[in-house]
Amino acid sequence: MPVEFQRMSKIPAKVQVSLTKAVRDHYRCPDGFLDFRLNDGISGEPGYFWFGAGAECYGRTLPGVPASQPGSPLRDTLHTVVRDGDQLVLPFDPNEVIDNFRLERYPSSQMGKVERALKSIYYGLRPLTNLALRRTIQKLRAAHWQKKQFPRWPVDTGVENICEKLFLLSIEARGVDRIPFIWFWPEGARGCITMTHDVESAVGRDFCAQLLDIDSAFGIKSSYQIVPEGRYSVTAEFLNRLRAQGSEICVQDLNHDGRLFDERDQFRRRALSINRYGREYGARGFRSAVLYRNPDWYGDLDFSFDMSIPNVASLDPQRGGCCTVFPYFIGDMLELPVTAIQDYSLFHVLSAYSIDLWRLQLEMILARNGLASFIVHPDYVIESNAQAVYKDLLAMLVEAGRRDALWFALPSQVDRWWRQRNQMSIIDDHGTWRIVGEGADRAVLAFARVVDGQLVYEKVNTPQGELALSAAK
């Protein structure tokens, strides 16, 4: 049902940073369609609350509304949205709430003192343990993961939920039929798929030649994340072999000891070496070991994009998740979130040797037209049963690509496209909307409109000239 807005005659004007930035950047819609103002009565204490069904938030809102813990029952702020002409007066700052998700600025994503101490002990003793013992410890660490209420397993689209709800309310508030925006992927692809391989050991490095052949048999090109020091030798011959078959080289951590983000000064020193290897390898992308991360420190890394933040990190040593299936900027660096479960967690934590979970995650990601990004380690698909599952995954992805017109891309290609899209604009060219900017020849004009209370997307200038509909639910 459409929201019935409260009316108000006058709210004191207040100079603020544009509240529309996060939503407008997501859609790349023209100026003037989004107009938000912040309610003067929001509180100073952040917490969890709803913004309509399915749109859970964390941040500051009206006094007495936010809760200290996620999950229901939470107070719903949707009914407190006020309409002042075409402007929406909101009970929270969308930029703040979306950044809280993307940058994992909510309590359940933070490691406490006990967790940090246990992590230090684990990595101190790790050289003395064998693989079986480490897997047992990791399973114990992941125990009770199903009880985590937030982020939402197996795919959390909290950012998309907020953006879509605000887009829908804006259409209704302005009384327009639809709002134009730049479609998310080039040539009107329904979604995007990237395959990445983190090389963790000499055994995994030596298996890369066979992994290249497996990927090539399915027409897949992947990126390989290389550990520069401590794990194995990295020769020019090895890197050139990867490049020769169309693969991309990215840097993975420095020495994979799990301590990259332990201490600020140490991180700065290590970042100097990491950046040097990035230049040596010609790498535009970075990923940290074990997906440990601290986005506030990324300014020390000299890379175009990062791939270290999971969508949902219920099974990872560092909990949390960015709650989005789309790329986003952290300063000048583009984040390509990891949106599918890693092979290690699937095989050795869940003990699941099938693609059922990957299939479910892919369906949920594509339902939001997002980025399906996979991590498969050459180290963990050497065994025949794991290798068979990986081949099943590739076959499923290829079939989905044919059926749904998906874009298979290397991470650097996604980075290049998203940066171009971020600089594109939609202009009114004598009564016709037109996309301008570098890369506009690959861009597709789309419209968002409301059908039966739901936001629906229409692509109107796909290469096939078709009208494509996808409900944003």
Image (cartoon, rainbow, N blue to C red):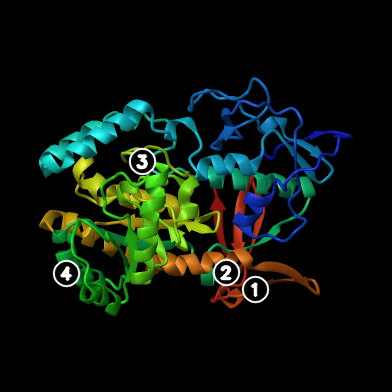
- Image location of residue 342, percent across then percent down: 29, 50
For residue 134, what is the image quadrant? top left
Q: What amino acid is labelled 1 in the image?
A: Gly
**Label 2 vs label 4: CA separation?**
35 Å
Task: Please tell me which residue is depicted at 61% across the width and 35% down the height of the picture.
Answer: 51
Say which element carries label 2.
helix
How crowded is the residue under tag 4: few (<14 C-alpha within 10 Å), some, or many (20+)? few
Residue on which the image places disc 4: 210
Establish if 211 lies above or below 306: below
Residue drawn 36% across the image and 59% down it = 274
| Outermost bottom residue | 244
Coordinates of residue 390 in the picture (x, y in percent): 22, 58
Residue 385 is tagged as none
Which mark is first along the chain, 4 or 2?
4
Would you name the residue on which mark 1 appears?
437
Q: Are marks 2 and 3 in contact (CB under 8 Å)?
A: no
